[in-house]
Image (cartoon, grey):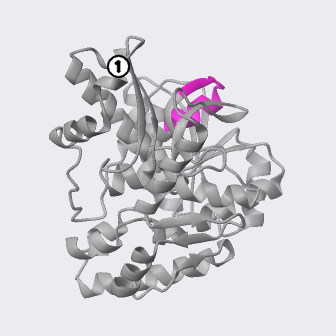
Amino acid sequence: MIIGSAGSVGHDMMYQIACMGLPIKVIGADVDEEKGRFEVEESIHVAHNLGYYPDLSFLKINLFEIDETAELLKEHRPKVVCNLASLGSWWVTRLLPPDEYKKIGPIGPWLPNHLTLAHKLMQAVKKSGVDVKVVNGAYPDATNVVLSKLGLEPVCGGGNMDLGMSRVKRIVAREMGVPYRSVQVYGVGHHGTYYTARMDGPYWVKILVDGVDVTDRFPNEKINRLYVEAGYGAPGQFKSAIVDQMRTASSFLKHVLAVYYDTGEVHTCVTGVAGLPGGYPCRLGETGAEVVLPGISHEEAVRINEEGGRIDGIETIKDDGTVVFCEENVEYMREVVGYECEELKPRDSEERAKELNKLLMKLYDKYNVEK
């Protein structure tokens, strides 16, 4: 089941899986019934054109209704749920003028948009009693940490530093003149380093070419330079809300399929696992995620990701799930958005999300941003 299948990442996943010819049943689920049904029909149409006939269907779902969601899970009993629902996607602040975006772009203070529905989904999963594995796409680097501390831990997330490491793989292949398939990369890093800092932050990487460790040939400083030279470091500025997220969708899909088919494969960098911040190399299967660290200690990997979290504006996450934001980011949110929040308690997430989105609409009006 793909929740948020009418959204940009969700519908990209639907199109991709429809055209893979896999023996799999997929339910697209979304609160937007009209668009949700349309996207499923379009996915089927594309698949038929390519000679595939997948078992795709649509289901209306409203994650605010926890009891109702629990009943739907009991009725349909999906093996894996991929949650892509959010109350405000990552790009909503990028529609603002660059100077304002630079101040409030770090995603940490906007966590209520991503935590709220994921929290409700995990409550529904627990209430349903169904043994369903959840891959959460709503800022898993932090959301999954909070949920884990509440006893509602998803299996993992996707995207984020995994996307950065995929680019590193291409950089290495080009630099060494070898096929992409010859390169294997394992990485540790947070969304803050990958996206907010454009790889100019703390991360760890191990690189194998045809099984030979060449990591020493690619120190972080060199990777950062090559990353920029390849054009991957350019921030870009969206002029509309239309976002192509095929790369992100494929990252989530490979993790979903690894769990669904119980591959036991070790993946490059998987976010939101084992209650830990950021991303780590992980073995994925139907029993869940196992962190696999080839050449770095657990303590060092966690430290790197905590530092990356601070780039996103998250100082720490307490044992009760309370998120403490960095002072600088709190001040920028106060100055630009008019939003006052030094700490976020999970129970306050929904109301904080409503407050954030009202204030964002005021900013849109101020800068004549098309909604």
How many circles with numbers are drawn on the protein? 1
Which part of the image, by quadrant, shows the C terminus?
Answer: bottom left
Relative to 232, 140 lies left or right: right
Q: Is residue 261 magenta?
A: yes
Relative to 262, 164 lies left or right: left
> Where residue 112 sits: x, y (%)?
54, 71
> Where residue 151 sits: x, y (%)?
76, 56
> Where residue 280 sits: x, y (%)?
53, 39
Local secondary structure at mark 1: loop
Relative to 266, 134 lies left or right: right
Closer to the camera, 171 or 17? Answer: 171
Three-letter code for the amino acid on which mark 1 is drawn: Val
Closer to the camera, 77 or 235? Answer: 235
| Residue drawn at point x = 53 percent, y = 31 percent | 54
Does residue 97 appear in this view? Answer: no
Picture quadrant of residue 344: bottom right
| Residue drawn at point x = 31 percent, y = 38 percent | 220
Closer to the camera, 277 or 217? Answer: 217
Residue range of the region highlighted in magenta in the rendering: 253-266
Q: Is residue 170 magenta?
A: no
Mark 1 crowdedness (10 Å alpha carbons): few <14, some 14-19, many ≥20: some
Picture quadrant of residue 168: top left
Does residue 78 appear in this view? Answer: yes
Picture quadrant of residue 67: bottom right
- The residue under label 1 is 214
Q: Is residue 268 above or below residue 194?
A: above
| Residue drawn at point x = 58 percent, y = 59 percent | 143
Q: Is residue 123 above or below residue 256?
A: below
Which part of the image, by quadrant, shows the N terminus?
Answer: top right
| Residue drawn at point x = 60 percent, y = 39 percent | 298
